[in-house]
Image (cartoon, rainbow, N blue to C red):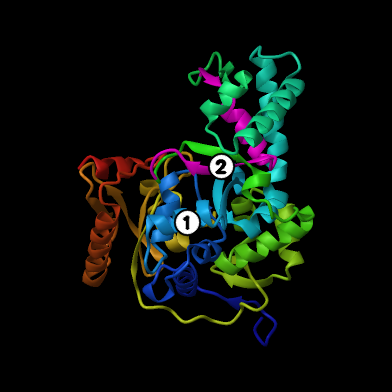
Amino acid sequence: MNPSGTPRTIDVGERRARLASRHRLVPAERAGDVVDVVRSVVALHATDAASVYLSARARLSAPTVAAVEHALYEERALVRLLGMRRTMFVVPVGLAPIVQSACTEAIAVVERRKLVGHIEQGGVAEDGEAWLTRVGDATVAALEKRGEALATELSADVPDLATEMKVGEGTKWAATQKLSNRVLSVLAAEERIVRGRPRGTWTSTQYRWAPRSAWLPDAEPTPPVDTARAELARRWLAAFGPGTAADLKWWTGWTMGAARSALAAVGAVEVALDGAVGYVLADDVDPVPAPAPAAALLPALDPTPMGWTQREWYLGAHRGALFDRSGNIGPTVWWDGRIVGAWAQHREGEVVTRLLEDVGGEACAAVAAAAQGLTEWLGPARIRSRFPTPLERELVGR
């Protein structure tokens, strides 16, 4: 608050400065440790396997694929889970119980109920709950015996996992799918199993599974839901503040009532944001210095552009070019804490960019250097967004 008692105004320039520094998009703030990178943005989106590595690379002082793999699969300081907005994330192990209580437990109930309904409607079993309980227990037992396994391997142990089910009959989305992935996803949401090392390279999306008790034997118990929501809101504010209650509601997938309660629980302080009411932590009200402008290339579904629902202050007029129809953002070019363009990897391996506004010679040179650096870092690897935007497709085909 100002001395007059009115909320302090945080303008667009300061919001961009906070974003660039706290999300490590400037050289001076690059991290030396992968887990520190993840903590900086609370969690990394993991729907695209490659995005985890590319998001980390953009924020590390000496990025390597091996460093990310070590944190995920050897040190096991990070874990994949279904979390906010029913989206796949990579989070620090210490945050997993908080996300589980604040978000995933409610998601697990819904996902289990949906799968039970599909099992019954698809003619797999009259009692879908009994079928899922029996098959789920058998799957966990088989996994505990194996230690780690692919879905195909578990289907050999538990043949019911290979059961095929018709979904979407009568619609253009009609298809036949095996139940294995659905069952495994529910078991993971219920904290019984976890996704381990992928089969193949770091861009692979086919994961081995492991019993949670064996993969994370020292995992903390889940806290009460209100405690967990308050802690998750605190971490979001530290990384993304200032933000609005609507931003927090969207980012978490909570109701507005739950978002407001969490903000109140952490003692969030009101600030003025260009006509909207925003919030910061009580010890984060003071102005922050602006870092030197820098370029960054962030992958599709990076946590920074997906951190708020009200995005005009860093997105400008580029929403139509950079998002698909479902609200998934493609790879973006950043300069001075805001989005100024898009990038993609050409079929031959070169990273190509397109600036969507005039940013001046210094920025153009910095973006070109960043694209060259990413081209060299990727080497023979080829990446494609799971939900490519029309602009990304155009760049890929150049």
Q: Is residue 159 visible?
A: yes
Residue 223 location in percent, x, y?
77, 56
Q: Residue at x 38, y 43 (%)?
A: 201
Lateral position of residue 216 relative to residue 29, left or right: right
Q: Is residue 241 visible?
A: no
Say which element carries label 2.
Answer: strand
In this rendering, position of residue 391 left or right of residue 147: left
Along the horizontal axis of the image, is 216 left or right of 153? right
Question: Residue 280: where, in percent of width, then height?
Answer: 63, 71
Of marks 2 and 1, the one in the foreground: 1
Asked which quadrant contains residue 32, the reply is: bottom left
User: Label 1 belongs to which residue?
Assistant: 70
What residue appears at the point 39 percent right and 43 percent down from the top-left corner?
Answer: 203
| Viewer-closest of 276 and 63 | 63
Q: Residues within 10 Å of mark 1 (few under 14, many from 20)?
A: some
Up-down relation of residue 318 to residue 283 (above or below)? above
* Closer to the camera in the image, 198 or 173: 198
Quarter of the image with the N terminus is bottom right
Residue 173 location (% of width, % of height): 50, 21
Q: Which residue is mark 2?
A: 195
Residue drawn at the location 74% of the way across and 13% of the way down: 126
Give the residues drawn in magenta, as a range.
174-201
Query: At label 2, which amino acid type do we have?
Result: Arg
Residue type, mark 1 in image? His
Q: Is residue 375 left or right of residue 200?
A: left
Dot 1: element: helix
Work out whether mark 2 precedes mark 1 in sequence or the reverse, and give the earlier one. 1
Q: Please report the residue visible at 45 percent of the width from the left and 56 percent of the height from the top.
A: 68
- Residue 362: give its label: none
Where 4 sits versus 218, above or below?
A: below
Residue 4 x %, y %: 68, 86
